[in-house]
Image: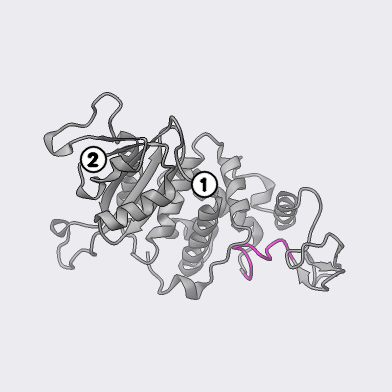
Amino acid sequence: MNITAPIFHDEAKAQAHIEASRWPNGVTCPHCGSDHVRRMGGKTQAGMFLCNDCRDKFTCRTGTVMERSHVPLHKWLLATHIMAASKKGMSAKQMERMLGVTYKTAWFLCHRIREAMDGANPTAPLGGPGKTVEADETWVGGKARNRAFRKPAAKKIVLTLVERGGYARSFHIPNINSKTLKGLIYTNVDRKSDLMTDMGHGYSMMRYHFNSHGVVEHQRRQYVDGNKHDNTAENFFSIFKRGVIGTYHHMSEAHLGRYLAEFDLRANTRDMSDGERAAAILEGGIGRRLTYRRTGQLAA
């Protein structure tokens, strides 16, 4: 989709686009689910609907990440499309310049879109019979030698599970011990899968719980042994690290989960066009809410 399209510049067309996307079979009330609704008239109630059953008013923003936002809908659509199309992410400063809003608005807008991305990610267990899932972890954070004065932020650990040819799912974890890894892997990976990991001690007992457990010994410079490797997860980390280094520079611990959801979503929709991905993000934002208070202190 071209960013010069009318929905990115015309508020009425943006509203009609969102309404058609959310209610393709007719408008229904987000409060009670009734289809006995009518569009309200007048300048002060433009874009509003009234439910004839519960008597509540609502708009296409109600019950989505856009609720109570004062940002125009056409800017919401443009920001969503930009983030959907940016393989290595889009900084809030760049979004501020492109949308013509304040940095605080751009920062909050980006995080709400990431919340919608999280909602668009699949939740079913990864893998299954005849399928292979890779598990690997990495560290996120700066190096002391790259700082002239200030100490770098504490490094954070990220675990990513990737089904070969399928979906990715990432988590911010406090440590790499067996209890932490088992809890996440057992919950998110089908036990009939073939699991591939490195030689980390946290994975030592996995062979008893999955169809098979392949291991590569990175310490001995072994990266591939036939079908045994975790290179798919490493490829995910390479793109994620490019986003950290080249776009965001720093990801605070409070918001790391939403950044991970952003990169998961783009990996999971890699076969979609940018327009299809943006549409999936809009759908993922239904039923989700992120308030400024929940985001905590303004951070990267």
Magenta span:
59-68
Q: What residue is shown at x 33% (from left), y 64% (from top)? A: 253
Query: Can you give x and y, in whole percent of width and height, for residue 121 in the image?
Result: 52, 49
User: Dot 2, crowdedness within 10 Å: few (<14), some or many (≥20)?
Assistant: many
User: Dot 1, crowdedness within 10 Å: few (<14), some or many (≥20)?
Assistant: few
Q: What residue is shown at x 46% (from left), y 66% (from top)? A: 103
Q: Amino acid at mark 2?
A: Asp
Rounded to the nearest angstrom, the CA distance separating label 2 from label 1 is 24 Å
119 vs 3, nearest the viewer: 119
First in residue order: circle 2 vs circle 1: 1
Query: Can you give x and y, in whole percent of width and height, for residue 28 in the image?
Result: 79, 59
Which residue corresponds to mark 1? 124
Task: For residue 170, say whether it is visible.
Answer: yes
What secondary structure is found at the residue carrying circle 1?
A: loop
Which residue corresponds to mark 2? 198
Query: Can you give x and y, in whole percent of width and height, for residue 156 in the image?
Result: 27, 59
Q: Which residue extends farthest top?
A: 226
Query: Can you give x and y, in whole percent of width and height, for residue 270 in the image?
Result: 49, 37
On-image quarter of the C terminus: bottom left
Magenta: predominant secondary structure element?
loop
270 relative to 61 in the view: left or right: left
* Quadrant of residue 148 within the rendered picture: bottom left
Q: What residue is shown at x 59% (from left), y 53% (from top)? A: 284
Q: In the image, is residue 41 above or below residue 137? A: below
Q: In the image, is residue 91 above or below residue 43? A: above
Q: Amino acid at mark 1?
A: Ala
Q: Which residue extends farthest front?
A: 208
